[in-house]
Image: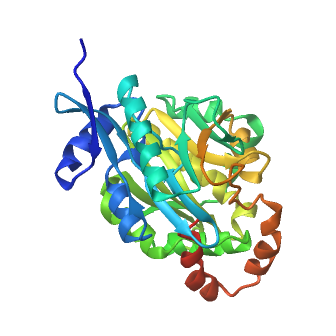
Amino acid sequence: MLSVVNVRPFVAGDSARWNEFVFACPEATFFHRIEWQEIMRSVFRHRTHYLLAERDGRIVAVLPLVEVKSVLFGHAMTSLPFAVYGGVAGSDQEAVAALEAAADALAREAGVQHLEYRNLEERHPEWPRQELYVTFRKEILPDEEANMAAIPRKQRAMVRKGIKNGLVCQVDPNVDRFFALYSDNVLRHGTPALPKRFFEVLKSVFGQDCEVMTVSTSEGKPLSTVLTFYFRDEVLPYYAGDDLAARELAANDFKYWELMRRACARGYRIFDYGRSKVGTGPYSFKKNWGFEPKPLSYEYRLYKRDSVPQNNPMNPKYRAFIAMWRRLPLSVANAIGPHIVRNLG
């Protein structure tokens, strides 16, 4: 007979055991790492509720939760803001259920409008869900040429165009060039940029598991950049930015090929292209690489609202804001943006 499941809040002394479990648990992701808790607290100033379940003193499941309270966007508890994946990590079904019951009690006590789990796999088909997002994951083949051959013909031609243009790819020691390209890029799309400090903290906290790579012309002009996470045998390009000249020179195409090529050489097995909204340019771009979309199961418990929140640029009510934001000077947008985006997640 199985021993009793004990659910309790995470405490500082659990850090090593939490991460040891996450790295060993098939259901866990990079975003279940315990370092995210302090990032949520120190960078975004959000209250965290990290829970773990134990049997006989051994961790068998974990649940990272963050409470986001905003006048503009409401009051929510999410696993996990600023992350593609979240929810409970663990295969012990009794422990999973116990953690979700504890989360429900926490959410009700806090008075949130909804509780959100950003699951990679479906857990509760009967719950309300967000069906806007998909992810793109594909195996990295062990041979570089095999990976090139696996790219569909038209996209492969764009990669070769970038190579022929003599582009240069470098791993950056800091986030300076990355942030310049990223912040300008998101401004052109009409959305606020995350603070530069966030990316500096990511580099500092995750060390070699967080890498910035920038593509430049042979003369040294930065064109395209990506901040990538590494987790177990997976490579996750996560934040990116491009100069206006990047498209003509195929710098974005070259960038992701170079990232894949380097990951292949280092023995990584999964290329996780990350989340995209269905029907957008990034969605089409990733499909052009031969990646098949996988719907993400973002599941909700609604307490004080009638429908799933739509706090994303696809919502028509944000069109006027997006148009206005695009007209702001970059320095103004970068100063104001972090105060807005911290509550979006």
- Residue 184 figure quarter: bottom right
Q: Can you name the residue that lies furthest to the top here?
A: 1
* Horizontal relation, residue 181 to residue 106: left or right: right
Residue 259, given in percent of the width and then of the height, sits at 51, 48
Q: Is residue 209 above or below residue 4?
A: below
Instruction: Give the residue displayed 62% in from the left and 38% down from the top.
Output: 296
Foreground: 259 or 116?
Answer: 116
Instruction: Give the residue displayed 71% in from the left and 50% down from the top.
Output: 306
Foreground: 156 or 57?
Answer: 57
- Tell me how the rendering is colored: rainbow
Q: Is residue 161 above or below residue 319?
A: above
Which quadrant holds the N terminus? top left
Instruction: Give the residue displayed 64% in from the left and 31% down from the top.
Output: 149
Q: Is residue 267 above or below residue 43?
A: above
Residue 288, given in percent of the width and then of the height, sits at 73, 40
Foreground: 101 or 220?
Answer: 101
Instruction: Give the residue displayed 22% in from the left and 49% down from the top.
Output: 15
Residue 161, given in percent of the width and then of the height, sits at 70, 51
Which quadrant holds the C terminus? bottom right
* Horizontal relation, residue 135 to residue 158: left or right: left
Q: Is residue 163 visible?
A: no
- Residue 246 figure quarter: bottom right
Q: Is residue 318 visible?
A: yes
Foreground: 27 or 154?
Answer: 27
* Horizontal relation, residue 189 to residue 171: left or right: right
